Image (cartoon, helix red, strand yellow):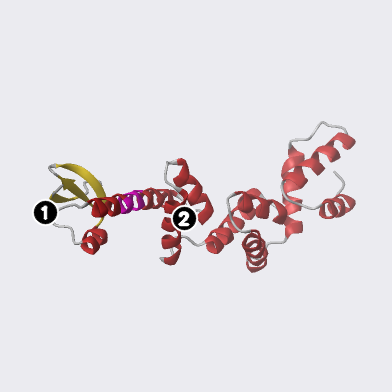
Amino acid sequence: MIVTALEPDSRGAGGVRVRVDGGPFATVGAPDVAALGLRAGRELTPALARELERLAEAFAARSVALRVLGYRALPGREIVRRLMRKGHARPVAESVVAALETEGLVDDAEFARHFARTRAWRRRLGPARLEADLRRLGVDEHVAKQAVAETLALEGIEPRELLREAAVRKLKGLRGLDPGARRRRLRVHLRRRGFSVAEIAEYLKHDPA
């Protein structure tokens, strides 16, 4: 097998298409081409072909990860899961994400802080719900807990105030129910939004529904 051409990837992903014996063989990054010493006319040995295929999968996985990150930030484990759903092997997905973390393009702690800040303000979610949602997205439990605590403190967000605002919003839709049913539904709603039994009881003691 002979490398017959090296062409820029028309998709604009910074890749290079490697043509072998006149046909497409693989698309890899420009640094990979330089590292392998690829050039038109070079013989593609079986060992070199296997390495080229390995690098092509890594390049494809990285391209997918960058497209995903272009839409929204995500924690590393979630990106690994998405790459695997696209058919990439776990070792490849994990290697790609590790490289992105080294480059600062994936940062679980920063993602968790942004997530906690926006969800607390926009959806009036309590600390427990914020931490649970972050864990479901693959953020480490310790990282999630620390990020939520730091963010609420830094932003001056009081969980009790979040609870009060969430309760006021919910009560608007519970008008017409008898007091007992209204309180039961409100308790369930507030628990689902991440507030503790003690916090809910304290609120209802001072602001009965």
At mark 1, the secondary structure is: loop
- Residue 153 image offset from top left, x and y in percent: 67, 67
> Who is closer to the viewer here, 127 or 80?
80
> Mark 2 and mark 1: span between their CA atoms?
32 Å
Instruction: Give percent across and percent down for residue 44.
Output: 18, 52
The residue type indicated by label 2 comes to Glu
In this rendering, the answer to whether 124 lies above or below 112 is above
Residue topped by disc 1: 40
Q: Is residue 12 visible?
A: no
Task: Say which of 14 and 153 sits in front.
Answer: 14
Please name the residue shown 27% across and 52% down the image. Answer: 52
Left/right placement of residue 150 relative to residue 25 reads right
The residue lying at 80 percent from left, 53 percent from top is: 196
Q: Going by the picture, which residue comes out furthest to the top? A: 176
- Give the answer, above or below, for where 97 lies relative to 155: above
Q: Is residue 202 left or right of residue 157?
A: right
10 Å crowding of disc 2: few (<14), some (14-19), many (20+): many
The residue singled out by tag 2 in the image is: 94
Closest to the observer: 192 or 179?
Answer: 192
Which sits earlier in the primary sequence, circle 2 or circle 1? 1
Q: Which of 58 and 100 is in front in this view?
A: 58
Q: What residue type is labelled 1?
A: Ala
Crowding at mark 1 (Cα within 10 Å: few <14, some 14-19, many 20+): few
